[in-house]
Amino acid sequence: MSDTGAGLDRIHTAGGWVVRIAYGGFAALFLLLCLLSVNGVPDLWMVMLATTVNAAVVSRGPLLPWAIAAGSLSLFSTLFLGTAVVLDTGGNPSLFAEIGGLLIVVVRTVWRMARDRVVQVTVLLGAALLIMPLRWSLITGVLFTAPLGVLLAVAIGIGLYLRAVDARRSRSVTAARRDERLELARDLHDFVAHHVTGIVVQAQAARFAASSGAVQSPDQLDTMFGGIEKAGTEALTSMRRMVGLLRDAQHVDGAPAAGPQGDVPSDRGSATRPVGDLDRLRELVDGFAHPPAVLSLAPDLGPLPPEVATSAQRVVQEALTNIRKHAADATYVRVSLARFGGGVEVAVRNDGRGRGRRLPSSGFGLTGLAERVTALGGRLHAGARPEGGWEVVAVLPLPES
């Protein structure tokens, strides 16, 4: 996962804790005040019941037992108090805490609970909420059941909306990862085709030399077969590093990454493209003129394996696309590739502050990019720079020679 994604997860978790602590503190204070107005055992029981319901609201444990406990206690308490006890018509103010807590538990249940249990638990909680006015009288039930029904419908609607948002985000993340895996599959096809073509050409040259009758020295034969061996080794290395990710690509969203004959779907035709060099990266940076982009290659960079060179290009392409969308005020863009430890660092930095145009974006480009970088054993960072601007930095490991 990228550093940005991890940071957002930490912020989301911290925010959840803040909300729970704030709500729990307010509910505890309110219920303590309710104890001051307790008049008999029934009122004390209602305060304890409201406490249990609100404990279900702030609980970080499994939701199912808490939701069942809150709904069942409220439901059976209503049945008992409505038939065996005469309550004060004024009621205890803890009733409002109980109603609010049940509504929040309904939202959490509809939002988070597994699909095979959500209907049953929601029905239990809804029934506990709707019959609550019967604790006093049938007339009270007639008067207040309809307003409670409206509140219940609103709570269910909020839960369904949040559930739909999570489902849509999950589908988007899965689609981004699947697309990146398909792109890796296309690259794998190009890598293998490139190397196998070299093997075939060198084998044909060896056969032609043998059939021409020309005497080949041991050094010449060793050079020919050494070239074939090197091309085969490079092909196997590329395949080993990329096939691991593609093993489970066919299980993502139930969509296979390859066709029934093993062919990978592609919209680029049957032609292969040269791989393993940085010419396409230079073309990409040279074509980015507004703001001007500068490419810096370390003198000791040397040739890169095809999967590393292609991944470096994808990092730069995604970073430049994000600059075009979200950093129109940038005055410069620096793209650099350099040796870093046992790998290559690819960095794209700009001084934009997000002012100007902001074009629509799916927001999942970095997710797919992180999938590719992690598959190669690298790491990705995307975030603000201390001196201002934005940077995307990827460290891609190099295979041991």
Image: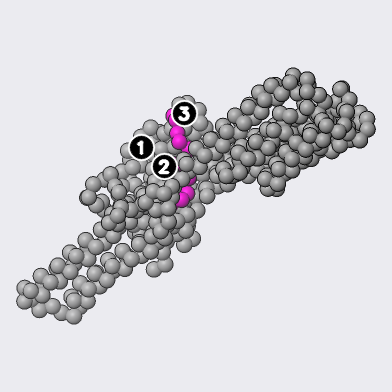
Label 2 environment density (alpha carbons within 10 Å; few <14, some 14–19, many ≥20): some
Kindly give the residue lying farthest to the front in the view shown.
83
How far from the left and from the top, in percent, is residue 295? 38, 45
Kindly give the residue lying farthest to the bottom in the view shown.
218
The answer to whether residue 392 is left or right of residue 217 is: right
Q: 262 or 267: which is nearer to us?
A: 262
The answer to whether residue 8 is left or right of residue 328 is: right
- The quarter of the picture where residue 88 lies is top right
How far from the left and from the top, in percent, is residue 270? 22, 50
Label 3 environment density (alpha carbons within 10 Å; few <14, some 14–19, many ≥20): some
Q: Secondary structure at mark 3?
A: loop
Q: Which residue is mark 2?
A: 318
Q: Secondary structure at mark 1?
A: loop
How far from the left and from the top, in percent, is residue 17? 71, 41
Q: Amino acid at mark 1?
A: Phe
Q: State the residue at coordinates (66%, 23%).
A: 150
The quarter of the picture where the C terminus appears is bottom left
What is the span of residues highlighted in magenta in the rendered image?
358-372
Taking the image as drawn, is residue 284 in sight?
yes
Q: 189 or 113: which is nearer to us?
A: 113
Q: Which residue is mark 3?
A: 358
Label 1 environment density (alpha carbons within 10 Å; few <14, some 14–19, many ≥20): some
Q: Amino acid at mark 2?
A: Glu
The relative height of residue 217 versus residue 89 in the rendered view (above or below) is: below
Q: State the residue at coordinates (71%, 28%).
A: 130
Q: State the residue at coordinates (33%, 46%).
A: 282
Q: 142 or 252: which is nearer to us?
A: 142
Q: Amino acid at mark 3?
A: Arg
**365 in magenta:** yes
- Mark 1–mark 3 distance (CA, rounded to whole Å): 18 Å
Q: Are marks 3 and 2 in contact (CB under 8 Å)?
A: no
**Disc 1 versus disc 2: nearer the observer:** 2
